[in-house]
Amino acid sequence: MTTDERFLDTQQVAGYLGIHEKQVYTLIHDRGLPATKITGKWLFPRHLVDRWLESNVINMPETQPIPGAAGDLLLIAGSDDPLLIRLTALFRERSPDILVLQSRAGSGDGLIALKKKLVHIACVHLVDPQGGYAGDHIRQFLGADIAVITFAERTQGILLVPGNPSTIKDLSDAFRRKLRWALRNVGTGTRALMELEMDRLGIDPEPILAESVPVQSHLDAALAIHAGRADAGFGIEAAAHLAGCDFLPIRQERFDLIVRKENFFLPQVQALLALLRVEEFEKIAASLTGYDLKESGKIRV
């Protein structure tokens, strides 16, 4: 084991999985094996490796149907988003007889919950290390029997102290300063984006991670920065707007809702998707800033 038994290095995870060490790198990039890179060295959170193994089991016994399939319950899990929270609030107003339970545990956990048939909808934004959106990986993970519906395009970037007193100019500049970073959990799309950008710029992540402040959501990150507990963090423009932080845009990303085809036509699922096309949803998005709804409601092939 490593000094911290919660983590495995590449050699240890190869032994744990019973494979050659070179195959580990293929699993990271092609099969989504959970990993993080510290000072050029891959580390694997053991509990996430166990969950990855469980989620990739084939010939799994049939799970019990989702409670409330008749239409009185809507279960959602996955990534965090302020506009999605407001959409579900609008849904509750329009469909008061349906109970909505929503877990904001990150894109990875949302996919696992959907694979296990524990939820109706997974909320996902994942970047592909080769560029763009990791749609192929999602279909490999879940199979072809899914519908991918665009929720919105949104702007990801760096949340900064109001007024940007450190005069941060760009991402490279931010990483090279001695800043306290608001840090999302491993398994979230935002954490994956941060690690991808550090790797692309050749940044040693260890000093950044050592001084980081753990946060649970985009808005938590923005509030931590506004309160002076952190100096910077990856997050979306809407969170910066809500908390009064400065914002340095990096990229546009797609935020999707993923549904098993067997659940696609359930009344509660269709009722939520229908709200993506109403004028009130557009007004809410405009008030938050940082969203583009041109593709909202579109089913991706």
Image (tube, helix red, strand yellow):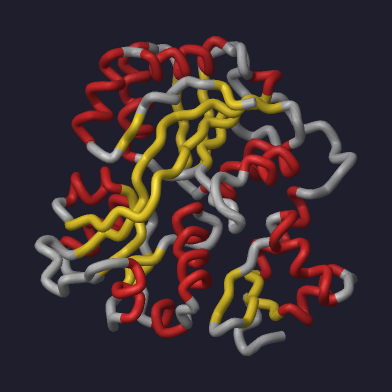
Q: Position of residue 175 (x, y in %)?
A: 35, 75
Query: Would you say 281 lies left or right of 147 here?
Result: left
Question: Can residue 120 be seen from the camera position used here?
Answer: no
Quadrant in the picture for the N terminus: bottom right
Question: Can residue 73 be seen from the camera position used here?
Answer: yes
Q: Quadrant of residue 245?
A: bottom left
Q: Position of residue 113 (x, y in %)?
A: 63, 41
Residue 190, placed above or below residue 67: below
Q: Count numbered badges in the picture.
A: 0
- Taking the spot 48% from the left edge, 59% from the top edge, the residue there is 193
Query: Would you say 280 lies left or right of 135 here?
Result: left
Q: Position of residue 97 (x, y in %)?
A: 42, 12
Residue 230, placed above or below residue 134: below
Q: Position of residue 5 (x, y in %)?
A: 65, 81
Q: Quadrant of residue 145?
A: top right
Q: Quadrant of residue 86?
A: top left
Nearer the observer, 5 or 80: 80
- Taking the spot 71% from the left edge, 24% from the top edge, the residue there is 65
Residue 121, placed above or below residue 165: above
Query: Would you say 100 lies left or right of 108 here?
Result: left
- Taking the spot 19% from the left edge, 45% from the top edge, the residue there is 242
